[in-house]
Image (cartoon, rainbow, N blue to C red):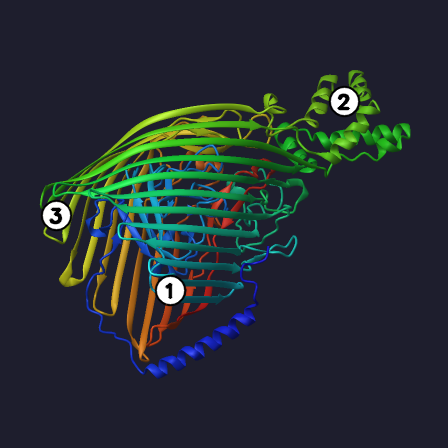
Amino acid sequence: MTSFFSFSTRTVLAQAAVLALQCLAADAALAQSADSAATQKLEAVEVTGQSRSQQLQNVPIAMQVMSGAALEKLGASTLADVDVFIPGLAIDASQATRPNIYMRGVGTQDFGIGTDSPVGIYLNGVYSGKTGGALLDFNDVKRVEVLKGPQGTLFGRNAAAGAISIVTNDPSAQYEVDGMLRLGNQGTRHIELLYNAPVGEDVAFRFTAVDQHSDGWIRNQFNGVQFGGDNSWGTRAALRWSGDTTSVNLTWEHEEMNEPGPATFSMTGGVVNFGAPSTWVSPFPPVLNNDASPDVQSRRFDGVTLRVEHSLPFAELTSITAYRGFTSQNYQDNDASSNPATFFSANNVESNSTWQQEFKLNGKTALVDWLAGASAYHESATQANPVSATTTSLDTLFNHAAGVAPFALLTQIANQLGAASNNVLLTNVNLLGQSWTETMHTTGGYSAYAVYGDAIWHLDPATNLTTGVRFTHDSKTFSWLNPLRSAPGLDAQLSGLTAGGFFTTVSALAGAGQLGPLTPQTVAVLQHLVSSNIEFNNPGTLTTPYQTSASWNNTSPRLVLDHHFGADHMVYGSWTEGYQSGGFNAVDVNGRYNPEYVTNWELGAKGQLRDLGLSYDASAFHYAYTNLQDLVLVQNANAGIPGYQVVNSDQHADGLDLGLQWQIDRTWRLTGTGEYIDQTYSKYTTPTGINLTGQPVGTPKFSGTAGVAAAWGMLGGMGNFNLTYGYVGPQRCNTYTTGQGTCFKAPTFQVGEAEQRVDTRLGWNAPSNKWGVALLVNNLTNNQYIHSVSALGEPFGSPYAYLTKPRMVAIEFNAKL
């Protein structure tokens, strides 16, 4: 795919140099120095997480906000780049089109189209789903709000564990032309462009574009291709009309991504190893040897949003109408080696479109600030999950599980019979090395309707009582089809063998006792085995889809009491219930999820000490989940490829969120955030029969961040410095994850160890504030970790890992007219 920005890096640098000289000349002509007399005060942060414009310190919800400027200083391109700096948020973006997102330990591993994530992601109030449209590049972001705990009365759908609200900049009447270029190691190139201008008296237009590219940090020894890089670009165009009582905002956004598939690293050194996890080897130093073909992840995304805001005599009316559509594919190597005996690739191809309509009314009186809303949502989705192996690697699987290698055995018998009868056709038979692909095809049609309300009652000047409720109706229709496996090379040979009476002859020889332990019955089993599906083997859906449907209704309430001690301090307590509809397992015919329910209690405090430049927030929480949905990988008892199975568990957790910001003086600012959580199973037995009740789920007990920032007068302009440290504690192992090898400690490495990261930035802005330069370093200490381990390759004796990225260093130049 051709990048949106097709000009060469040399041209970019030349143009940047010319622009820099022009800006220097302009600054010299201005002959003015930047004003560095910033006062020691705390910045007021405005948020809209409660569907109202409020100051962050007045919102009785545990939430963390990152401004667009903060994201830029971190060099963040997507949400996955900042989760380590938001305690309680965890995003596994090893597979960019099917990320796993967790809030306070709650999320899902399910990548299928039959379910949703309990963490809702919203872009300008529009629900983004959980797969291909969830992890788009940041483009002209104003702020990111992370709200923890159930938020169903405030957002349109699927926010049982929390919500992430991404807010972008609207068109304005101000003329703006901005650009930013970032160049770094690993072939990193990041470009941002902005154009904003008034179009007549009441209309404004805004266009932004972003291009993100890096070559990758490791070379694949199998084919020489660089892996671990980025290659995406996106645009957004918005038109805003503002009248006396009405404003209309129409936005179109587009993004494309096309890059090598996720890099997977062998835990066995590329050899077949069916031993316990303690016999695995460290993937460090990293060696990449992926032989899947294709090996690519890509996405094409389009979205259109119409937002209309109108002032009524008694309230503000907001209408949001939105369309989202994307196609994506994720092909990868699932044995992490080029060993023919272990070849395996499990993939995902998806197409999705959604229509959303939401109406909100906001009003306020001396007694109450109220919100009422209604939403409708419709989604159409298709998915294909191809699973590819070869007859050679399938022999590895069967030989380990059942003590027989059917393709090698039949090849040997055919060759021996050919030699004995001087039959060249039989002598040349070779059933090994043939491709084998099975595919599950699924379709889904979903509708969701909801009405909700939220009212903040002013009991007295210092005390508020918030009451909220949401009524939801969800309906889903789903179908599965798993046609006969595709193995053209194998079938050509099997057809010739069958036509020549090979299996009849072999069965007769087995009946006569001339083939050792083989019997006519085992010959029939072998013939069926090499001709039939192994993974997706439901006989009822080989030729005709199986379709089913289900619907659910729910009422979820919210109750919050907050009290203010003067203008600067607040305490609050809340009780909230949340819900997520049931769903379907996309890779198991008629596999179903029950609805999940959560009850969340929270006690918190927020405030600031103005004279000291100090602000704080703290919240203690307890939640209890019933039927929390997830998907786990289960080894096939019939010697087949492992399958994903629906599970529901009851879980509970106790935790504490803390946040602190200290503006020491006009130069220095310190920040710190942290979360402690103790999450365990209340009731759960794994599909393999292991009782995990009372054991930890796996969520680290502690995660936290610390940061220091400075701004000072320098060379007539302003220097700035940021250093941010993020820490995520070790994963808490349980009996199941230790046995699966997804959480354990070996002599030379550890799966699930604590992770640390340091990002820093040193910059300078010119006196005119129209241009600046900066040096950025992500992962300053160059720490790399085993981010996760997959057991998907274990039946082939080839478990594998995903690794975090090494250090990235870049120089940034920004300018505006």
Residue indicated by mark 1: 760
Any part of residue 444 in sight: yes
Q: Residue at x 33, y 68 (%)?
A: 721
Badge 1 amino acid: Thr
Q: Quadrant of residue 498?
A: top right
Q: Residue at x 81, y 16 (%)?
A: 512
Q: Secondary structure at mark 1?
A: strand
Q: Quadrant of residue 642?
A: top right
Q: Is residue 273 above or below residue 480?
A: below
Q: Secondary structure at mark 2?
A: loop
Q: Count residues near mark 1 (Cα–Cα under 10 Å), then give few for <14, some for 14-19, many for 20+.
A: many
Mark 1 or mark 2, earlier in chain: 2
Mark 1 or mark 3, earlier in chain: 3
- The residue lying toward the viewer, choosing from 345 and 781, is 345
Residue indicated by mark 2: 516
Q: Residue 563 vs residue 88: left or right?
A: left
Q: Is residue 689 above or below residue 127?
A: above
Q: Is residue 254 above or below residue 638?
A: below
- Contact between labelled residues 3 and 2, with CB atoms less than 8 Å apart: no
| Residue 619: image location, x then y, percent | 22, 45
Residue 564: assigned label: 3
Compute the Cα span from label 1 to label 3: 37 Å
Q: Quadrant of the C terminus?
A: bottom left
Mark 2 or mark 3, earlier in chain: 2
Badge 3 amino acid: His
- The residue lying toward the viewer, choosing from 31 and 535, is 31
